[in-house]
Image (spheres, rainbow, N blue to C red):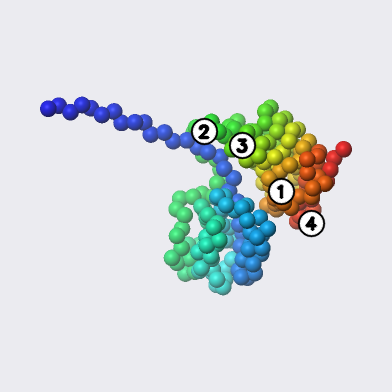
Amino acid sequence: MVSEAITLPRIRAGGRSFLALVLTPEAPLDLWFQALDAQIGRSAGFFAGRPIILDMSQLSQDTEGLSSFKADIEGRGIRVIGIEGADPSWSAYEGWDWPAGFGGGRSPSADLEIPDDDVPQPAGARGTRILEEGLRSGQSVVHADGDLIVLGSVASGAEVCAGGSIHVYGALKGRAVAGMAGRSDARIFARLMQPELLAIDGYYAIADEIDADVTGVPAQAQLIDSRITLKGMS
């Protein structure tokens, strides 16, 4: 009996752009965790499902509580996908489940096919980027090299991220993350400001923290004294 040859299926692999949050713990860790718990209490769903990178560069190997830090943070439902600024040889890190082979996400991988539900970014894009259409729920655009202009709307569940400022000529109902390149002077402008989340240079505000007077009207957001501040525009 001759068995028939089996044609094996082709394995498909693609790339997907995503925004990872970077948490930078500082000593004393017990006070840092108190501040984190307070933030989680104000916005319980913010960290849910979000990839987190730990930047441990501000801690020394004798920092109290360092050995249990990763277990303590994951016990709060925070999902760690990468660790930076740490020396794995330190005794305090012994026993840590170290994410292997993750480079921190600083440079995009080349030659990867972006799935259809993401909006592709042209290779080598620099300066201001203009999106002719709006973003649907689930879509994400990251332009780390300058300002991002959206001529349409950003739907709830969509996300726009820029190294500089963000301009939305329609309704901003999703997430907008500006100043990714350390630009504390970046701003977020929207013809209709109804965001799920606003962030500038690592500081953020969720919908419940935004004044109702600037919700649903033309407005801009900027960072003042380490707080996201909104004001209406005529």
Amino acid residing under circle 4: Asp
For marks 1 and 4, the one nearer the N-term is 1
Please tell me whether mark 1 or mark 4 is closer to you in this view: 1
The residue identified by callout 4 is: 225
Residue 8 visible in the displayed image: yes
Give the percent coordinates (x, y) of residue 84: 54, 56
- Res. 115 mark: 2
Residue 128 visible in the displayed image: no
Give the percent coordinates (x, y) of residue 232: 84, 43
How many numbered marks does the figure carry? 4
Can you tell which quarter of the image residue 57 is in?
bottom right
How far apart, in angstroms, are the residues tagged by discs 3 and 1?
Answer: 17 Å
At horizontal 75% and vertical 56% (from top left) the residue drawn is: 226
At horizontal 55% and vertical 50% (from top left) the residue drawn is: 49
SS class of the residue under badge 4?
loop
- Res. 207 mark: 1
Give the percent coordinates (x, y) of residue 175: 67, 43
State if disc 2 and disc 4 touch (CB < 8 Å): no
State if disc 2 and disc 3 touch (CB < 8 Å): no
Report the residue that reaches farthest toward the left.
Answer: 1
Can you tell which quarter of the image residue 85 is in?
bottom right
At horizontal 61% and vertical 59% (from top left) the residue drawn is: 24
How far apart, in angstroms, are the residues tagged by discs 3 and 2?
Answer: 15 Å
- Res. 137 mark: 3
